Amino acid sequence: MVFRRWIVCGGGLECTPDHVAPVPNSKAHSGGVRAKIKRRLNGGAQKKQLSQTGRSGSRESLSIPVSIAESLDLSADRTTVIRPVHSSILGEKYCFEVINSENNHCFGCSSAAERDRWIENLRRTAQPNKDNCERTENSLSLWVYEAKDIPPKRRYYCEIHLDGTLFARTSSRAVGKSSQASDGTTSGGAGGSGNQGGCQLFWGELFELDNLPPVSQVTLHLFRDDDPKKKRHSKDDSVMHPLGSVALSLSEIKGRAFQEKWYPLVPYKPSGTGGVKDQLGSQASLRVKARFQNLLVLPIEKYKEFAEYVTVGYVGMCSSLEPLLNVKDKEELAGALVHVLQSIGKAKEFLIHLGSAEVQRLGENEALIFRENTLATKAIDEYMKLVGQKYLIDTLGDIIAQLYASSESCEVDPQKCSSSDLPVNQQHLKKTCSEVVQKITEMHRSFPVELNEIFSSWVSDCEELRREEIGHRLITASLFLRFLCPAVLSPSLFGLTQPYPEPNTLRTLTLTAKVVQNLANFTPFGEKEEYMFFMNDFLEQHWELMRGFLKRVSNPDSELDMARFDGYVDLPLRLAVLHGLLVDIISPMEQDTIDSLQPLPSILNQITDHLGPDAPRITCSSFSPGQPKPTYVPPRDLAKYSPLNKSLQHLPTDSKPSHSRDRQRKQVTRTQSVPTRKHFQPLKRQTSSEQLQKNKPESEEDAGPPMDISLPDNARVKGPPAPVPWVIEPHQTKTEQEEMSLLDRHVQELSELRQGVEQVAERELELAKRLEDFISQSHDQNTQLQAEVQELRNLLAMREEQLASATFRLGVIEEEREEDERKLSIALAAAERMNVLEEQFAGLLNDMQKLNVAHNDGLRASYITT
């Protein structure tokens, strides 16, 4: 494992580099941290002394074995921060730093996967119970597009600061058509100051900053890139200060959507000086698109049900959601889902299923495979970026760096180049394409095993359908159309380089990507691009080589030594991202649509309950369509409750025979509404709640007075006869009447209570129905308003893009106008000079004529004289 380490003690690592632009070529960079590293490595005899001085506050750097990282004591300091370092800070990719209260340690790895794995291992060392703790993840996505109305004939770069700490910087770019991206040198000598000819400068660079500390403001500083030697020896302190700054409030850019606008540059003005205000134009500004996300990640146990649902039902979830999503939501959902499924080991099955479904969906329209904005297309894009990053760098990294450094032109369109340069440019393009194709077809060592397994499954499925050619179409459409060729065309978006290519380099990359894509499609160039006809011979010569490559990468029994993805995916974080994304997508939908997605909305709401009252929720119906409405279910042990209890849940649901009521009544405890009648024995069985004898058979409980008339005569057990049967005592008749009257009153009260319960239930149902109607109307109105707002936002974004495009074109036209005015002034001066010369020539002609006349007169006079 290739592992490098730099250590910086006694201060923040981000602030240690000098304010100079990042340089891809280390030879061109003579100042800052990297030069210090190089000087220290050359001075091997001083390493020991340097290590000792480093602990006392030195900011020098040195190389230390990897065992030092393993021996770091991270558990002692709870404030330890472990995060990636952007490549623009040290000029090295795949670095990360360990920050604690005493010092900072910076390490460099050989790949992004190795860096992520080290970061995760060190974080778990510092916090072993990391997945079971609640945490907050901050991330910033920032596009730095361009600047306008800045002084010409200079090179500029931007630094990105979070709460005053440097986190990244753009490449150094020169104003004007002759700018060369990130060559690290100044373009020309000292230019004029003031607002002379304010110009436009384009960067077009994306910065993805994750694992950020809590921040409140993002600041962009615009610096003029001077020669580092001149900067260090200059007596003018203004060269160390930014020309101007832009402050972004996180409240404006917080959320899932990007916010793009022109921000005015505020000139830097040191105290006691006149400042540098005169160096910036009055309209100096930066065009920035940014998004800041603050995500609360719950303990992983809170996502258990959600993870199980995604693991089992991801196919049904995607099929249900895809018709309801726009292109941007499909892209974000596919990315989040791929990371979750990769962590739980289901990503390959997911991609295999999507590829097969794509073939069945398109049928005979095989040319559209992975060309439409579908979840399958977006998912394969994200998955190849995830598992194929190292393969991409090993395959195209060196050749892209060569093309960026080269000044050779590959322009082969006769309308864009001279006829004398055309043959040379054609040879350059053939050479470039040959090198790229050779790199692609011969690079097997780092080809992802996961892609080989997916491709082989696609080919096998298509062979079962007797459509073998579609299997290779799937491979070329995914590997080349969605991965390799876009990486050649836009290397800065795939992590191959940071700067946006210059126009000459961009044209070379565009033509190279066209040739490689046609080669993968086995399609020659047609009449639409006649200027590329000369490359058809090149295509035919490499078709067999391409067929062999496609067979090797899709062969399940391939003997090639391939690489397996060894990076780390933070499952709780990715589940939190997927949860927030699904809530944002489903919340604005209509209620019927939300109900059709059950149980997903309910599962998402269960997680939302742990995020606090302000977290957005999905509105779910109280019951789903097609299911019976909820009905009252009595308690299991209803008989032990008194019928006169005021709680509605204790009431019986239907009437029962009198003998059943008598049986149940004997099992309940006595209430205060029925007095005890211990002195009256004949009615004891009906009214008393005293405990019966335990040895009494259960059948004897049915024996009672004549009130139990439902039993047949032969089954009735009569009580003991009265001493005088034909004589009825007055107090006995009165007591029986009182008991019967009391029982009738109880029955009447019970009936009234039942009727009251039914009325309350009907009233509740009516109120629930009204509430549902109100919620539905409110939801429809809210949805309509949100749709109108989104439409207005889209229209505003489109107008801003049109305005930005028109502004850029206007700047180009203005430059051409100035150039034309300069040429016109030269032409006018030449015309004036011509007029003067013509006047002088006319005077000479007159003089000559006069001389000829005088000469002729003299000759005639001499002739006459003779």
Image (cartoon, rainbow, N blue to C red):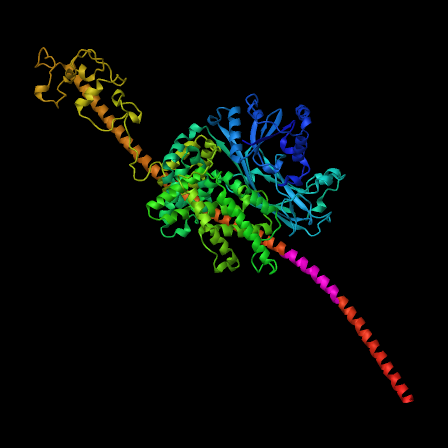
**Count of picture labels:** 0
At a point 12% along the width and 19% down the height, the residue shown is 706
Query: Would residue 411 appear left or right of 617 to someone viewing this image?
Result: right
Name the side, left or right, on which 603 lies relative to 508: left
Q: Position of residue 177 (x, y in %)?
A: 64, 52
Camera sees residue 259: no
Looking at the picture, does residue 172 appear above or below residue 428?
Answer: above
Magenta residues? Answer: 813-831
Q: Is residue 359 above or below residue 135?
A: below
Q: Is residue 452 visible?
A: yes
Q: Main secondary structure of the magenta part?
A: helix
Residue 308 vs residue 394, the one in the foreground? 394
Q: Is residue 420 above or below residue 336?
A: below
Residue 170, position as x, y percentages in the image: 61, 42
Quadrant location of the C terminus in the rendered image: bottom right
From the viewer's perspective, is 820 left or right of 351?
A: right
Q: Nearer the viewer, residue 46 or 751?
A: 46
User: Does the magenta portion include 695?
Assistant: no
Inspect the magenta stretch and tell me whether residue 829 lies in it.
yes
Residue 782 in which image quadrant: top left
Towards the viewer: 182 or 600: 182
Residue 822 percent across, percent down from the top left = 70, 59
The residue positioned farthest toward the right in the image shown: 865
* Quadrant assignment for the N terminus: top right
